[in-house]
Image: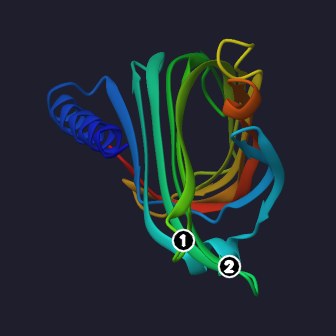
Amino acid sequence: MKVKITLCVLLSAILFSTATVSAQDDNNWDFELAPLYLWAINIEGDTGVRGKTGSTRVNFGDIWGSLEGVFTLRFNAVYKKKFGMIFDYNYLDLGTERGTDVVAFEVGLKSQIVNLAGTYRLLDGVHQLTGLAGIRYNALEVEIDFIGTGLGADADKDWADPIIGARYGYQLSDQWALQFHGDIGGFGVSSDFTWQALGLIDFQPWRHVAILAGYRAIGVDYASGSGSEKFTYDVTIHGPVAGIDIRF
């Protein structure tokens, strides 16, 4: 897991460095970089380890109190207002101690979601329509330790799904715009089905800086193995999102 996190962070740095050089040498490129945006997530669905499945419902207040690490980054590039790419990375590290009158236990969850897609702009102007196709990569590491007993359980899974979708933008004025993103995928390749929906209000008070706020949701229905080795992850992650977008 740590190796994968490092590789994703290195990829982010390479993309940013390449974009900066290209922007200086070629004005045919447009770039958007949103480092460390906030996604106040809630988690709902069913998860299962070693054949045992249970319902999961965790709100942002519980997650915030258990947060041990977080890293988010979004990068978009468009060449000559036609061809482009999207890179979006989300890392979450949660740790919490729970218990009953009989036993206390610690639960740890590390999650990565990476969206990487190529894009093609179909319509430009006040109305913008862009098609996209790519992959969504998920990685999960779950650990449960029963304090003082030496017993525990863990699961470490990762998978990638093909995705297709579209982005739509509407320019309300010189400073205000609306953005919408939707995609679907999986199709039984890894997940049975996965989807994403994002709606944003875009306010750009300065030439190279915009403020974004809206709501985002990602759903995934994934299962692997069977019997005592079965792993289930049928979950929707959703919540408000906000950040600063650097444009050049």
User: Residue 148: percent from the left, percent from the top?
Assistant: 51, 77
Residue 196 against residue 91 in the figure, above or below: above
Binning the other alpha carbons within 10 Å of mark 1 as few (below 14), some (14 to 19) or many (20 upward) gives few
Q: Is any part of residue 82 visible from this angle?
A: yes
Q: Where's residue 69, x and y in %?
A: 42, 66
Mark 2 or mark 1, whichever is nearer to me? 1
Give the residue number, with chain letter if any, for mark 2.
Answer: 103
Amino acid at dot 1: Thr
Give me the disc on residue 149: 1
Residue at left 26%, top 28%? Answer: 27
Give the amino acid type for the residue marked by disc 2 in the picture. Answer: Val
Residue at the (68%, 24%) spot, across then down: 225
Q: Nearer the viewer, residue 72 or 128?
A: 72
Residue 238 vertical placement versus 122 (above, below): below
Question: Which quarter of the rendered picture does the C terminus lie within?
Answer: top left
Residue 159: quarter of image? top right
Mark 1: secondary structure: loop
Q: Is residue 56 left or right of residue 147?
A: right
In this view, the residue in front, 73 or 190, is 190
Q: Out of 62 and 33, give the one closest to the viewer.
A: 62
What is the x, y in percent for residue 205?
A: 49, 64
Q: Are marks 2 and 1 in contact (CB under 8 Å)?
A: yes
Q: Any mark on residue 70, and which?
A: none
Residue ID at (55%, 49%): 154
Placement of 24 over or under 172, stated as above or below: above
Q: Quadrant of residue 242?
A: bottom right
Residue closest to the eye, 41 or 54: 54
The span from disc 2 to disc 1 (Cα, nearest Å) is 9 Å
* Identity of the residue furthest to the front in this view: 149
